[in-house]
Amino acid sequence: MPPDAHHEVNALQRASDIIVQKSTREGFGLTVTEAMWKGKPVIGGAVGGIVLQLRDYNTGFLVHSPEGCAFRIRYLLHRPEMARRLGKMAREFVRQHFLITRKIRDYLTLMILRENPTERIMEL
């Protein structure tokens, strides 16, 4: 697909039961985070930025080979409840770690800590 096929990629991700990003090298690929935000289980190559996005057996699966990828695809297709659970956890993981609201939370936390440097427990 051409690089500007954003609508098509969005439609394919939303219609998919599982998203696979089996890269051999990868930076912080937005494909993985986009799919996770859409609540889809993701199977990704255990390389680069994909490892920072997926938590193996928690928000998706990290794989090292095409055979491992095929095994996980089959595993999820035969366990739709597990696929839904992974997708739900993946969406929450993105909400907590990759949205701009997390940056705001971090910034506010830093401001509170600067104003109260002796506090050992902080409630937000």
Image (spheres, rainbow, N blue to C red):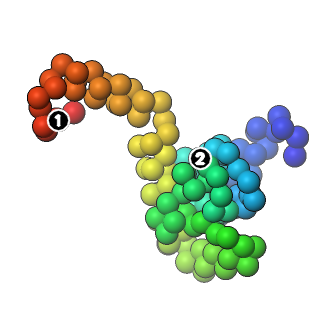
Note whether 4 is above or below 62 in the view shown: above
Q: Percent from the top left, x then y, of residue 92?
A: 43, 50
Q: Percent from the top left, x then y, of residue 36?
A: 56, 51
Q: Secondary structure at mark 2?
A: helix
Asked where in the image residue 107 lies, by quadrant, the reply is top left
Question: Where is mark 2, residue-wise?
Answer: 33
Going 76% across and 39% down the picture, which residue do you hit? 7
The answer to whether marks 1 and 2 mark residues whose Cβ atoms lie closer than 8 Å is no
Going 16% across and 26% down the picture, which residue do you hit? 117
Question: Where is mark 1, residue-wise?
Answer: 123
Badge 2: how crowded within 10 Å, few (<14), some, or many (20+)? Answer: many
Q: Percent from the top left, x then y, of residue 108?
A: 30, 24
In front here: 7 or 96? 96
Q: In the rendered view, does 55 fall on the left or right side of 41?
A: left
Disc on res. 90: none
Extreme residue toward the right, this view: 2
Q: Percent from the top left, x then y, of residue 22?
A: 73, 61
Q: In the rendered view, does 94 fall on the left or right side of 107?
A: right
Q: Is residue 77 visible?
A: no
Going 41% across and 34% down the picture, which residue do you hit? 102
Amino acid type shown at disc 1: Glu
CA gap between label 1 and label 2 equals 29 Å
Sequence-wise first label, 1 or 2: 2
Name the quarter where the C terminus is drawn: top left
Going 16% across and 35% down the picture, which residue do you hit? 122
Badge 1: how crowded within 10 Å, few (<14), some, or many (20+)? Answer: few
Amino acid type shown at disc 2: Thr
